[in-house]
Image (tube, rainbow, N blue to C red):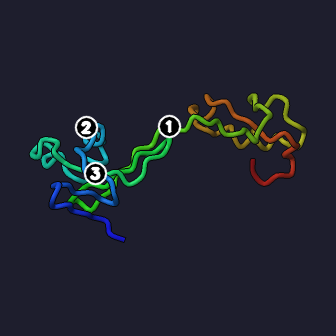
Amino acid sequence: SVDLEINIQLGEMTVKKHALELLDPAYLQLPDFQAVIGRRWIQDVNSSLQGAEVKNTTHRSWVRVVGKRHDLQLWDMDARVPPLAQTRRYDKGQGLASGEHWIAEALMDAPPAVMALTLHLPAEDCSDAPFV
């Protein structure tokens, strides 16, 4: 298939049937984009970079940058909440089965930042489990 089409009569250039457009300034502000393309080059061209849409979905915008051999993809944050497989709340060693005290012992040396989190355990007894 042909990626680039130039219509000489109309003076239009398209990439896979998508017209070229100036890149959205949001792309130019991305630190990863600036690191790859270069901040100085971006300032020199005064945001005249062009791109063509490759695919646009509900949570992703995909653009091919003309002349740079790079594609850009912007993703929205995923609003789905993953199911929590561990349903039993760990409460500083309280409520553990008699064989589960190894869990409290393993967490004694955990950094304070870890212990500040809300930790959860599987619903079933973990006395014989090698890890949780």
Q: Residues within 10 Å of mark 3 (few under 14, many from 20)?
A: some
Locate residue 102 relative to residue 65 in the image: left or right: right
- Check the image and name the residue furthest to the right: 98
Q: Is residue 83 above or below residue 3?
A: above
Say what amino acid the circle numbered 2 marks: Pro
| Screen quadrant of the N terminus | bottom left
Q: Which callout, 1 or 2, points to the residue nearer the camera?
A: 2
Locate residue 97 relative to residue 14 in the image: left or right: right
In three-dimensional space, the C-alpha distance between marks 3 and 2, rounded to whole angstroms, equals 18 Å
Closer to the chain start, of discs 1 and 3, is 3
Q: Residue at x 18, y 45 (%)?
A: 39
Closer to the chain start, of discs 3 and 2, is 3
Say what amino acid the circle numbered 1 marks: Met
Residue 121: x and y in percent read 77, 39
Q: Residue at x 77, y 31 (%)?
A: 89
Q: Which mark is residue 19?
A: 3
Q: Residue at x 24, y 46 (%)?
A: 21
In three-dimensional space, the C-alpha distance between marks 1 and 3, rounded to whole angstroms, equals 27 Å
SS for tag 3? strand
Q: Residues within 10 Å of mark 2 (few under 14, many from 20)?
A: few
Quadrant of res 44: top left
Using the image as rendered, state which of residue 124 and residue 33 is in the foreground: 33
Q: Residue at x 28, y 40 (%)?
A: 24
| Residue where numbered disc 2 is placed | 25
Q: Which mark is residue 77?
A: 1
Labels 1 and 2 touching (C-beta < 8 A): no
Using the image as rendered, state which of residue 89 and residue 1 is in the foreground: 1
